[in-house]
Amino acid sequence: MACTVLFFGLATHSQFMNTGHMPPPKKQPIQQRGRVSARELMPMLTDWRSSGEGIPGYRALADRLRLLVLDGRLPVDTVLPSERTLAEALETSRTTTTSAYRLLRESGFAEGSQGAGTWTTLPRSEGRSESPIWPEHLSGEPDPSGARGDFSSAALEAPPELYPAYQAAISELPRFLPGNGYVTSGLPVLRDRIAQRYTEAGLPTTPEQILVTNGALQALHLVLGLVMERGDRVLVEHPTYPAAAQAIRTHGGRCVPLPVEAGWDIGRMATLIRQTGAHLAYLMPDFHNPTGLLMDEAQRRELGAMIADTGCRIIVDETMRELDLRTAVPAARAGVPTPENLPMPRPLAAFGPAEHVITLGSASKTFWGGLRIGWVRASQPLIRRLGLARGNEDLSGPLLEQLATANLLEHLPTIRHQRQRLVAERAVALRDALAMNLPGWSVPMPQGGISLWCHLPEPRSSHVAASARAMGVWLTPGPRFGLDGAFEARIRLPFARPTHDLVAMTEVLARAWHSQGRAHSLDDDLTTV
């Protein structure tokens, strides 16, 4: 979860809000803090004493509150209930809540002042070295160096082709040095190759319909800033990608959940649009994160007709599109070469009005997150408006990474085949390890993507995440992908790490799960759903 918090900070500030090409933003006036009542907090604190065996009550309560902050379910800068009020609601002593709040303040997760109460914060990193993103060991025992097992990041290591791509980019860079280096819409060679990719997939596209951005999240922020008004309702899949839901809230939108665990119900989507007045939707039809589902072509055709009928704009996030596992997983399990992919449905934009479907893409999942290259595919008028809006924020993206990405796209078929085989082998290994160590869990194999969306027999996702963290493994609990605390009986497990890491972390996960199971029954946890 700590990685997730860092990701939000980088995505919404460093990448495009304050790049050094413009004066730092003026200090905003202090706004009134949000508040959470004890009644609102109670459903998130059910069985808070289960954070671990032998842990004092005040520490267990502090651990749960800290997890809620890291999870995003308890927003930063939210005033907590008074110590007395929370103690009464939890039927515990005021000493417990007072000590828990003190521990939160000492660890940097809360601040307080006389008369203003206690409010949530995030720890500052001044003077501290951050622990590595990737673990140095996976024994599950506490590590004095601060290294940890990261089971939360659905992002792969760089492919072998990346370094040669950078070498080729450096050799091409001198011809750009006489210019000023600013290419607000993106390098023409990269826009051309992205457009060619869409055309080959069945969606004719010109380079003028492409805007290159610093990652897909910047693309999403730019689009939201242009097509959404504060207070607008936005239809989002449920579960959904957490950073997308946060981006919608940041721009003042109100998320309306559309259940998708069983697939997309276009009729229900149309009903929700009519009932709520939503004029915008955010969808991931290409190997949805976190479920790995793929919307078929018939559903896309139905959705396109619905878009034309309702006038609802659709933001399509296709960052996982290249990670098709439908043939790669059976081949990996059988130990045979991966055959040709099954035909992919055409991109959703091929089925709806051009001005109503906006597509986001990224190099992060297919190639490497360190590239920080994303893009928007939309109508030319909208791309021009997005280019102007982008110029007011960070002017341009880095040339070297754009050149490297253009080189990688030239080798996309080869890299895609290798990535699919690699990811499929890891998916099979992780699912087999879960079947051995946690046989009570239901673990569907996704059609694509980089993660398993596990169904737990008991609604204890947050408890397991807290216990695993104490053993050195970081997980993202199910509610992080839901709205209002949903999906406590789900957990997302990426298979982005090497196989031996995945197996080792699964053993730690089993210990975390069984330690909870010995202390609490299913009946004790039902109210957390």
Image (spheres, rainbow, N blue to C red):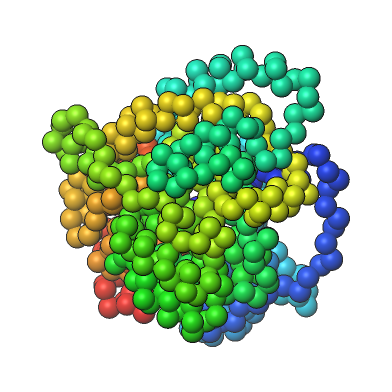
Please name the residue shown 56% across and 73% down the image.
279
- Towards the viewer: 395 or 211: 211
Is 465 displayed left or right of 9 in the figure? left
Count numbered badges in the picture.
Answer: 0
On the rendered image, what quadrant is the C terminus found in?
bottom left
At x 69%, y 50%, the residue is 384
The quarter of the picture where residue 85 lies is bottom right
Residue 28 percent across, percent down from the top left: 83, 62
Give above or below for 25 relative to 160: below
> Which residue is at 37% across, 61% downward?
300
259 or 14, which is in the foreground? 259
The residue that appears at 50% across and 62% down in the rendered structure is: 353
Judged left or right of residue 250, residue 177 is right
Q: Quadrant of residue 141?
A: top left
Query: At which x and y percent is residue 343?
Result: 28, 45
Q: Examine the rendering and report whether any part of residue 238 can be seen.
A: no
Q: Residue furthest left?
A: 334
Which x, y percent locates residue 332? 20, 36
Q: Is residue 5 left or right of residue 426?
A: right
User: Would you say 465 lies left or right of 360 here?
Assistant: left
**Residue 234: % across, % down:** 55, 70
Q: Nearer the viewer, residue 245 or 232?
A: 232
Q: Quadrant of residue 462?
A: bottom left
Residue 218 visible in rendering: yes
Q: Is residue 363 above or below residue 511?
A: above
